[in-house]
């Protein structure tokens, strides 16, 4: 596999697993090519392919960003191709009223609800995940609707992109 495809594959993996979240600005082609010690054209070509595939968006004079709509489009696609297989959870719903969201998710997976699902953070067993600290805390609600503090400043953006749901 050539360098361009290796870079592309790593970036797609990072986008899909959340290492590069929607809206994140990626390093400039110059900076990334220096960091990877590859030709700048290699990075430019990888970025161009990712823009064409919908993973990235290029904003003139601002840089290259992970496409905010990409994950939404992928979910829509798979829900059409394989109806009923995927179950989508909105974090805001989970954080504000977790019990019905958890019950629905478990039902989708043919699992029964247990109170421990709601009180996961009280579990004293060892956690060896990368998010071991988060496992011990409740769901964060502090950032929900925080964007509304900037609603006036964001009005032109909302007009272009559409209202957030």
Image (cartoon, rainbow, N blue to C red):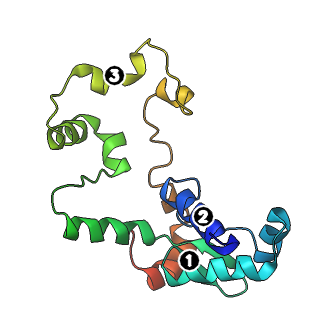
- Label 1 crowd bin: few (<14), some (14–19), many (20+), radius 10 Å: many
**Percent position of residue 146, x then y:** 51, 54
Q: As displayed, is residue 137 above or below residue 16?
A: above
* Left or right position of 154 against 82: right
How far, Cα to Cα, is label 1 from label 2? 9 Å
Q: Is residue 88 left or right of residue 63?
A: left
| Residue at the disc numbered 1 | 50
Does 46 sit left or right of 141 as displayed?
right
**Where is residue 10 drawn, in percent x and y?**
61, 61
* Looking at the image, residue 99 lies above or below residue 19: above
Label whose residue precedes the other's in the sequence (1 or 3): 1
**Tag 1, which secondary structure?**
helix
Question: Which label belongs to residue 119?
Answer: 3
| 156 w.r.t. 91: above or below | below
Rendering coords of residue 51 (x, y %): 55, 81
Q: Are marks 1 and 2 in contact (CB under 8 Å)?
A: yes
Which comes before the other along the chain, label 1 or label 2?
Answer: 2
* Residue position for label 2: 11
């Amino acid at each position: 596999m050539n360098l361009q495809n290796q870079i592309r594959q790593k970036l797609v993996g990072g986008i899909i697993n959340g290492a590069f979240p929607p809206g994140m600005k990626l390093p400039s082609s110059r900076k990334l090519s220096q960091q990877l010690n590859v030709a700048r054209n290699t990075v430019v070509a990888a970025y161009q392919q990712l823009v064409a595939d919908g993973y990235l968006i290029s904003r003139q004079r601002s840089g290259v960003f992970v496409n905010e709509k990409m994950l939404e489009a992928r979910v829509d696609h798979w829900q059409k191709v394989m109806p009923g297989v995927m179950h989508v959870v909105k974090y805001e719903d989970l954080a504000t009223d977790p019990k019905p969201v958890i019950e629905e998710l478990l039902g989708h997976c043919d699992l029964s609800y247990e109170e421990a699902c709601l009180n996961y953070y009280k579990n004293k067993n060892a956690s060896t995940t990368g998010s071991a600290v988060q496992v011990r805390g409740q769901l964060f609600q502090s950032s929900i609707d925080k964007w509304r503090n900037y609603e006036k400043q964001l009005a032109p953006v909302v007009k272009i992109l559409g209202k957030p749901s």
